[in-house]
Amino acid sequence: MPLKDIYHALIDSSLARWTAAALARALPEPHVALTFYDVAMPGLPAHLSGLRVLHISDLHFRPGSELARELPDLAATVPHDFTVYTGDFIDTDESIEAVGRILERMPRCDGVFAVLGNHDYLSHGRINRFNDIQRLRAVLRDAGIDILSNVSRPVCGGELFIAGVDDPALGYDDLSQAFSGVPDGACSLLLAHSPDIVLRLGRHRPGLVLAGHTHGGQVRLPIVGAVHTESRIPRRLAMGLNEHQGTQVFVSRGVGYSGLDIRLGCPPEAAVLTLRSSLAAEHAA
């Protein structure tokens, strides 16, 4: 049996769920933390240095995974120019309207963009059933979110492009289509649910890739690190800001839970990434 199947069999067992419930009662009450990163963006014009992007991923909103309720108040405490979501808003479509009410309360900014994840499409725990993806899309649009399905948008007067691919975990991504509207040499930011997108960038070289999906492992052990990531990327890339073959990638630990309703060594986060221009740094020096 493949390791992935063994892992899922273990976390779906009654013993695993009983253990997770016992640990959850023993651990401090979880809360979403704001984390902060400075990112040097190749090609970012000097006068755009300091742009702030609020990155949120993997809400997985459902009973038992409701930390997304904290996001509107949390986001209101930190100035940001753009908000981006990298998928897995829900597990089942019963949560669509509730997620919409949370997202409608989020603070307004210059632009709000999202890509969809595998859980948005596939109804969790229900074999061969898909969620009502069109209803989810409509609710996200009503909340002011621009869904990037293999497309890009110019922002900041066309001096920066935000591109997004549909879910790579399900094979819905099309990088060529997503970057078809991005001029050669333009500064770009790529959104994808799964960080596996960095394994097939080909000739496309965004200044930064933002992703989720791994939850940072959700359970991280000393020395071992992430126990399981649901990803083919090297495990060192499964959380935080790193570089892969010359491309910067930030992978969010996410907000909600998948599988077991517990996190160990991997608290939920909403990240604020401040984009810095190398030209601005040179002028300051």
Image (cartoon, rainbow, N blue to C red):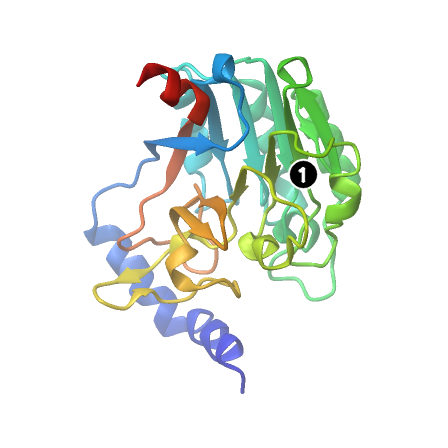
Other-residue count near label 1 (Cα within 10 Å), few / some / many at <14 / 14–19 / ≥20: many
Q: Is residue 19 visible?
A: yes
* Picture layout, residue 227 above or below residue 64: below
Q: Nearer the viewer, residue 145 or 25?
A: 145
Q: Nearer the viewer, residue 269 or 191?
A: 191
Q: Residue at x 60, y 29 (%)?
A: 187
Q: Nearer the viewer, residue 259 or 161?
A: 161
Q: Amino acid at mark 1?
A: Gly
Q: Secondary structure at mark 1?
A: strand
Determine the image quadrant of residue 98.
top right
Determine the image quadrant of residue 85.
top right
Q: Residue furthest bottom?
A: 1
Q: Is residue 125 left or right of residue 149?
A: left
Residue 164 in picture, x, y percent from top left: 67, 38
Q: Residue at x 43, y 75 (%)?
A: 10
Q: Residue at x 37, y 22 (%)?
A: 281
Q: Is residue 4 left or right of residue 261?
A: right
Residue 134 in picture, x, y percent from top left: 79, 39
Quarter of the rendering occupied by the N terminus: bottom right
* Picture layout, residue 126 above or below residue 190: below
Q: Is residue 61 visible?
A: no
Q: Is residue 106 left or right of residue 115?
A: left
Q: Residue at x 49, y 34 (%)?
A: 56
Residue 270 in picture, x, y percent from top left: 41, 33
Q: Is residue 161 left or right of residue 15?
A: right
- Per the image, the residue denoted by label 1 is 164
Residue 146 in picture, x, y percent from top left: 69, 26
Count how many numbered circles sit on residues in the image: 1
Quarter of the rendering occupied by the C terminus: top left
